[in-house]
Image (spheres, helix red, strand yellow):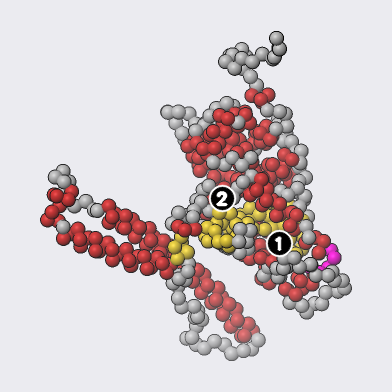
């Protein structure tokens, strides 16, 4: 008779097992567990200080964080999928110490501690810098559109909001009039046990839709008003500076009593201004990869060339990247110690205001003024002294023709674009789970934090457990 190794699925274990033996040494799950054990989780623990011990005790925050971080690292981000994995996946069972938090507990933990993620991101980044994985000699910036947790078909323009508001008001008035006309036969319509003055379901639906439309319309009007006031303030500041320059040069002073006035009169939203009912903070944006408009956010990342560590992460509602250069550089400086050598970015970040900003004087910026046409070979390298009388745009274009700058700029795609590919393709993160710019911003920080942990793992860094 053929002999096999013993197989007894129902046999009880005589001694409790060491769960870490269930997965091989050097597993990503064990690395994440050790890394999180080195972090300061005081901000998370502090949130439980005033809780009583009545009812069920909370799951341990360190365990929940490890399970959540590992899930985002391996592309299991849904709370329901994480709950299932804590039963089915050995690595999740090791991290949870064979506990099985339900999806509601996981979702609540994520929402509850979103505000702690920026601090955790910085702690992990500090570990990466101490490990020599962040040099800051060369960084690359880029943005990518990531779908919001909302459909673009749930958005409505200001023009349509106004039209629908008027139509619904008319329909509600007609329904109320019809209801009043039929009060005489209310017993037959509603039954003897009804008062007869309940609103018809059709009227309730219309009133709910009208309230949502009016709320969206008011929000667009408030945004337009705030933008108008900011533009007026900026325009008046320019006028004042212009008048002062004239005065300094001996020009005519402004007329008495005239004062400075803004030429911008209207604060009404543009007819095509959009508002989404599901996630009002998201915007319809053009995605160059999918060649289509999507309800999305613009996710920003600054990546260090040494090991593709994300050194700054941010989220914006702006469809273009032009306004993101200065904030991202400031964020890199806040997050990391040391000076930035060279910063690379594509033409979407270019503006003369950006490249002439005095706060960036100590950084070599390489940002082309114009987008290079696909398939067209790059311009031939130039040598020789750069003329001093060139405009900032022409000067930047001339710098990018030098051999040194060309060789540096060629590295941009290889530094930052693979990071977005790894996040979207390898980990399958193409749509945010949360809604609202504050929550979504923190979710993006969680994505970037887990990207950095994976990079540290693949580079062989080991946390010091003491």
Residue at coordinates 82% horizontally, 61% vertically from top-left? 407
Of the 4 image quadrants, the one containing the C terminus is top right
Residue toward you, 167 or 225: 167
Question: Within the image, what quadrant is residue 413 found in?
Answer: bottom right
Q: Residue furthest right?
A: 384
Majority secondary structure of the magenta segment?
A: loop
Q: In this view, does 276 lie to the left or right of 9?
A: left
**Helix, strand or loop under label 2:** loop
Instruction: Give yes or no for residue 403 being in the magenta stretch.
Output: yes
Query: Does any portion of residue 225 appear in the rendered image?
Result: no
Residue at mark 2: 431
Task: Residue 29 in the image: state x and y as whole percent.
Answer: 66, 33
Residue toward you, 458 or 264: 458
The stretch of residues the image draws in magenta is: 400-404
How far separated are the C-alphas under marks 2 and 1?
24 Å
Numbered circle sitting on residue 345: 1
Q: Which of marks 2 and 1 is nearer the N terminus?
A: 1
Q: In this view, does 305 lie to the left or right of 54?
A: right
Classify 10 Å Cα crowding around label 2: few (below 14), some (14-19), many (20 and above): some
Of the 4 image quadrants, the one containing the N terminus is top right
């Amino acid at each position: 008779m053929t002999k096999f190794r013993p197989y007894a699925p129902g046999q009880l274990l005589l001694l409790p097992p060491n769960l870490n033996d269930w997965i091989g040494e050097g597993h990503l799950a064990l690395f994440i567990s050790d890394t999180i054990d080195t972090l300061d989780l005081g901000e998370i623990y502090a949130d439980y200080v005033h809780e009583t011990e009545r009812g069920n005790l909370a799951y341990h925050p360190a365990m929940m964080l490890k399970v959540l971080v590992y899930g985002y690292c391996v592309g299991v981000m849904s709370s329901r999928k994480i709950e299932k994995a804590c039963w089915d996946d050995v690595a999740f069972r090791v991290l949870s110490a064979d506990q099985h938090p339900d999806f509601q507990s996981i979702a609540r933990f994520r929402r509850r501690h979103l505000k702690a993620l920026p601090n955790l991101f910085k702690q992990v980044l500090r570990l990466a810098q101490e490990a020599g994985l962040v040099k800051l000699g060369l960084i690359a910036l880029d943005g990518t559109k990531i779908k919001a947790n909302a459909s673009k078909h749930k958005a409505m323009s200001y023009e349509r909001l106004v039209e629908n508001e008027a139509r619904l008001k008319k329909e509600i008035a007609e329904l109320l009039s019809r209801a009043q006309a039929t009060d005489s036969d209310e017993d037959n319509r509603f039954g003897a046990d009804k008062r007869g003055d309940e609103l018809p379901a059709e009227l309730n639906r219309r009133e709910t839709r009208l309230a949502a439309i009016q709320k969206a319309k008011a929000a667009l009007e408030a945004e337009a008003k705030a933008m108008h006031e900011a533009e007026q303030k900026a325009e008046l500041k320019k006028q004042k500076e212009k008048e002062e320059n004239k005065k300094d040069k001996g020009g005519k002073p402004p007329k008495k009593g005239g004062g400075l006035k803004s030429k911008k009169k209207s604060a009404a939203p543009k007819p095509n201004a959009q508002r989404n009912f599901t996630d009002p903070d998201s915007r319809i944006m053009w995605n160059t990869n999918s060649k289509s408009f999507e309800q999305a956010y613009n996710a920003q990342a600054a990546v260090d060339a040494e090991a593709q560590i994300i050194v700054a992460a941010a989220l914006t509602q702006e469809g273009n990247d032009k306004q993101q250069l200065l904030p991202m550089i400031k964020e890199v400086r806040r997050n990391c110690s040391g000076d930035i050598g060279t910063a690379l970015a594509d033409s979407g970040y270019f503006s003369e205001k950006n490249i002439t900003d005095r706060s960036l004087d100590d950084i070599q910026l390489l940002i082309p003024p114009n987008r290079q046409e696909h398939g067209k070979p790059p311009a031939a390298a130039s040598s020789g002294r750069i003329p001093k009388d060139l405009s900032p745009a022409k000067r930047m274009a001339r710098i990018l023709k030098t051999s040194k700058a060309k060789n540096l700029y060629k590295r941009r795609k290889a530094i930052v674009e693979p990071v977005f590919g790894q996040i979207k393709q390898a980990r399958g993160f193409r749509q945010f789970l949360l809604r609202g710019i504050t929550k979504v911003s923190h979710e993006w920080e969680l994505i970037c934090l887990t990207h950095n942990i994976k990079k540290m793992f693949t580079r062989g860094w080991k946390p010091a457990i003491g």
